Each structure stands twice: as structure tokens, then as C-alpha cells.
Amino acid sequence: MFSCTVQGPPEHPVIKLSGSLTLEHSREIHAELLARLPKADVITLDLGDSEKSDLSFVQILCSLLKEQDKTISFTSLPPHLLENAASLGADSLIKEITNRTEDNP
């Protein structure tokens, strides 16, 4: 199961992705993010309630973080995402998203 909820103002939404962030839901995840990208220059992703992720979500994140005209941050990073990225050898992604977490000084 996958769900997406949005809080906050349209110019700085907090997009909460919950459940399974896997290939099974990748089309839905992609569509939800694409629907919100044109409306905001600053976006915060909350992945704290996600249960698992796979290569497809790592690819979506990599693509999302290449948006030059967007400021994207994260409220929390679930252990499964960091473990998955590490197993894929995505060290640069781990560093990038860790630097973008709100609790990172």
C-alpha cells in the first residue's frame, strides 16, 4: 500500500509518502511528485512513515534532486532507504539526502 498526503502552503508543501515506496507504486509516486513540482520552489519530503523502498524509488529521488530550480529537503529518513541506497552503491545520494534533512545542522 502507498499513500501521499500534502500539508502546508502550496508554495512550500510537505509531501508525506507513506507505505511501500517500490516499483509496484512507482508510477503513482512519480505522478504525485510531478503534480506538485510546478507549484512550489521549496518542497519538503516526509518519508518517516514509509515501510520499504527499492531501486525504483532511489531512481525517483536521484531524478528529483537534480531539479536545479527547486529546494528539496527531508524531515526524516527511514533506515530502509539509507540501507537500500547503500546496498546499491549510491553513496552520493546518501550524502546528498542526509545533507538535506531538517535535523542536519
Image (cartoon, helix red, strand yellow):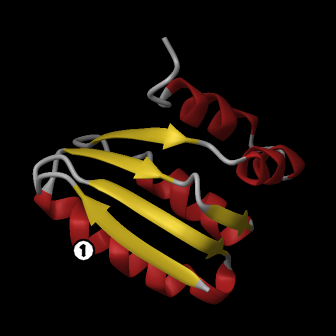
Position of 26 relative to 43 (above/below):
below
From what the image shows, is residue 40 above or below residue 56? above
User: Which is more toward the observer, 18 or 70?
Assistant: 18
The quadrant of the image that shows the N terminus is bottom right
Q: Residue at the location (35% across, 75% down)?
A: 32
Instruction: Tell me: 94 left or right of 99.
Output: right
Does residue 33 appear to the left or right of 79 in the view shown?
Answer: left
> Is 82 placed left or right of 34 in the picture?
right
Mark 1 lies on a secondary structure that is: helix
Q: What residue type is labelled 1?
A: Ala
- According to the picture, the residue beneath numbered tag 1 turns out to be 35
Crowding at mark 1 (Cα within 10 Å: few <14, some 14-19, many 20+)? few
Q: In this view, does 32 lie above or below 91?
A: below
Q: Residue at x 64, y 40 (%)?
A: 93
Quadrant position of residue 24:
bottom right
Q: Position of residue 18 (x, y in %)?
A: 54, 68
Residue drawn where x is 55% and y is 41% of the image: 76
Q: Position of residue 52 (x, y in %)?
A: 74, 66
